[in-house]
Amino acid sequence: MTPISRSGTGRKGLATLICGALAAGGLAAAGVATLEPGAASASSHREAPLISGTPQYDNTDVYAFVSPDHPDTTTIVANWIPFEEPAGGPNFFTFAEDAQYDLHIDNNGDAQGELLFRYTFKTHTKNNKTFLYNTGPVTSLDDPDLNITQTYDIDLIKLRNQKVTHSTKIADDVPVAPSNVGKASMPDYSTLRKQAIHKLTNGAKTFAGQADDPFFLDLRVFDLLYGGNLSEVGRDTLKGYNVNSIALQVPTDMITESSDQPIVGIWSTTQRKNAQGYYAQVSRLGNPLVNEVVNPLKDKDKFNASAPWDDAQFLKNVTNPELPKLIEAIYKIKAPAEPRNDLVDVFLKGVKGLNQPPKVRPAEELRLNTSIKPAASPKRLGVLDGDNAGFPNGRRLSDDVIDASLQVVEGELVGSKNDLGDAVDKNDKKFGKSFPYLANPTAGSRGALAKGVSGGNDVRNQLGDALQPAGAGTSDDTTLIAASAGAGALGILLIGGGLMWWRRMRGRAY
């Protein structure tokens, strides 16, 4: 699929629901023109000037869906630290210790959180006399060779009118899955991932650690919309990059107001401790792409830091969006008429009859109707293609939010039928069938040699020559000993041109 091609995909569900609401005049009656402040969030891969310089605090995406293998539970996934290069050591990727990573639940549609799950992290170092993240192959989360580790606590906070009414610690010192340094360092990463899944009370589960970035898209859209001539489409530019993920699976009745009101609004925030010792909000995220392509530069930092109830100031960015005008200027596809009340109905209120709470207060939240059962065969366009268990009814890992959002922005629901997209229809890695569902992170050992790129043998030969002692003859097996300042020795064995780090020798501190 390319940005101006048509795939012939049928349109059901969402178009019928939205058009019915518009025809009934429901939008005007709901008071959209006087939007009350609500919780606004945004998909965030370096989407605002300030947060792009502090990636540990930068939300990338939020997902919320009814768990496919446990439909009485709801799963929330929130990601941080965009564009993690797998080989980006020696300081690999950790959650910040001076941050509060929060998952918010609005279970009555008033745009204020009634529940908050707060994750806070601690870093532990076994040996600070080495530059290594791990000092040998790691086979378990408590392996002494895993030098840098993290643990986390979870607090469940209940609120009313943004005031804390009760706080309970529901998890303490849970281990974090480490960064996937490489095959020599972590020969069985799947085992480490499984060990990082922690069971809470009432059948809830939690996970924190590195994962493959599940968002799939061609980010070259920012090169004036795919190169200005559609020459830059069809490549998943997040392929091979990782993120730090928090995943939480809870019984659905734990987060909903009642069985009669099964719709919840979900978003995440990051709060960072400032110089005065107080926590200040620096990032927010709910629906994808809002702060990236909806808000102009003057609003981006303000949007990330502003309180949820102050979002009326951003309404014009939704009703008079820039993106359709840009597409019209470059590709001559006429922009739909403004104001774009169809976008308000889908992204600020939820779809009437599907995931719009009664007496909804318009707000930018990821809204999920938890009573909709998981689809046996999920469709990547979700509700737009008749699959009511998908985006914008929550967001599953496999939902193609770029194509769905682009088609809606270009007027799919107001008579401008289209099949626009970026020609990236799925993630490069398969998602799991059980919690936390995320694909394992790409290993740091991947690269030219691991991929078998032409010329790899030459690279190996050059590496072997460079590591031989001066004046030594050629040899397939060369052992080098490198001293660690004032602290013993670490052996490096070069076998057939490949490097392997040995475990520390017993009894030798290093």
Image (spheres, grey):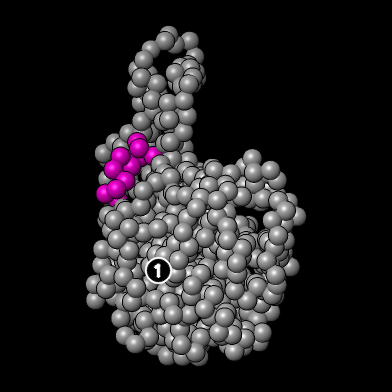
From the viewer's perspective, is residue 355 above or below residue 291? below
Of residue 296 and residue 420, the one placed in the foreground of this image is: 420
Q: Is residue 290 magenta?
A: no
Residue range of the region highlighted in magenta in the rendering: 182-192
Q: Position of residue 200 (x, y in %)?
A: 27, 71
Q: Is residue 187 magenta?
A: yes
From the viewer's perspective, is residue 487 above or below residue 196? above
> Total marks drawn?
1
Of residue 460 and residue 121, the one placed in the foreground of this image is: 460
Residue 167 seen in render: no
Tell me the quarter of the image containing the C terminus. top left
Q: Amino acid at mark 1?
A: Asn
Of residue 219 and residue 254, the one placed in the foreground of this image is: 219
User: Are there few (<14), some (14-19), or many (20+) residues within 10 Å of tag 1?
Assistant: many
Q: Position of residue 56 (x, y in %)?
A: 53, 59
Q: Position of residue 283 (x, y in %)?
A: 57, 68
Please tell me which residue is depicted at 38% across the width and 36% down the height of the picture: 488
- Residue on which the image places disc 1: 388
Residue 415 seen in render: yes
**Residue 451 relative to residue 303: left or right:** left
Of residue 457 and residue 69, the one placed in the foreground of this image is: 69
Please tell me which residue is depicted at 40% across the width and 58% down the height of the picture: 379
**Residue 401 relative to residue 229: left or right:** left
Q: Position of residue 139 (x, y in %)?
A: 27, 45
Look at the magenta stretch and give its main secondary structure: loop
Please tell me which residue is depicted at 41% across the width and 30% down the height of the picture: 450
User: Could you say whether the residue bearing mark 1 is in a helix, strand or loop?
Assistant: loop
Please tell me which residue is depicted at 75% across the width and 55% down the height of the picture: 329
